[in-house]
Image: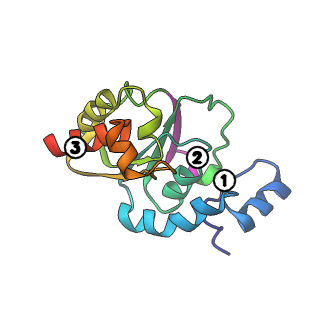
Amino acid sequence: LIKPSPGYKPDPVWWKDQIHQIIGAPMLLKRLQMPAIFQALALRPGMKVLDIGCGSGYMTYQIAYDGAIAYGIDIIKMDDYYIPENLRGKLTFIQTEGETMPFEENFFDIILVSEVITQVTEPEKMLTEIKRVLKPTGSVVIIQPLDRRGIREDYQNNSGFIRFMRMLWTI
């Protein structure tokens, strides 16, 4: 059995599924980032992992394939996300906002926040929720490019990313 390409997202149509296994995530940049991201995640079987702003779910599927129990949340509609038989019970998608998460306290071992911080209007609320649902021994992996504006302009404009990072230092 050949291991699917990084970012493989299953499809219920068999021939489309075969193509997806070969090409993986269609976004080249995300495919290039995945090895470093998964090294930072340091997944172990059975860990509960939350992917905030999971979008199409490429990273969330990969988390589940790597043996963790994966949850993906996003504000987009997720009713039609296909979950293959071998991932049932290991993969869940929920439509919600990062500022209000439907999980118990101390639920997750790891939380992935990939390219989301600048999209959230109130990052303080999201950080509070992350702190609430993360186990005391858990970790958060944040991936956020600074776009083309650069660091100086982000600081001058007090961007959502900069506000979020300043909050992390105060915890």
Q: Residue visible at 52% across and 45% down?
A: 91
Disc on res. 168? 3
Asked whether, in this view, residue 99 is left or right of residue 119, the answer is: left
Disc on res. 138? none
Which residue position is annotated with label 2?
Answer: 57
Precedes in sequence: disc 2 or disc 3? 2
Residue 104 forms part of the magenta stretch: no
Disc on res. 9? 1
Q: Residues within 10 Å of mark 2 (few under 14, many from 20)?
A: many
Residue 14 picture location, percent across and down: 82, 55
Q: Are marks 1 and 2 in contact (CB under 8 Å)?
A: yes
Which three-letter amino acid code belongs to the residue tagged 3?
Leu
Pick the front one: 91 or 171? 171
Q: Are marks 1 and 3 in contact (CB under 8 Å)?
A: no
Q: CA distance from mark 2 to mark 3?
A: 26 Å
Precedes in sequence: disc 1 or disc 2? 1
- Callout count: 3
Q: CA distance from mark 1 to mark 2?
A: 7 Å
Q: Residue furthest bottom?
A: 1
Which mark is in front, 1 or 3? 3
Residue 83 picture location, percent across and down: 63, 45
* Highlighted range, magenta: 87-95
Q: Are marks 2 and 3 in contact (CB under 8 Å)?
A: no
Where 41 falls versus 80 (above or below)?
below
Residue 58 picture location, percent across and down: 59, 52
Q: Residue visible at 54% across and 58% down?
A: 62
Residue 160 picture location, percent across and down: 37, 36
* Quadrant showing the C terminus: top left
Q: Secondary structure at mark 1?
A: loop
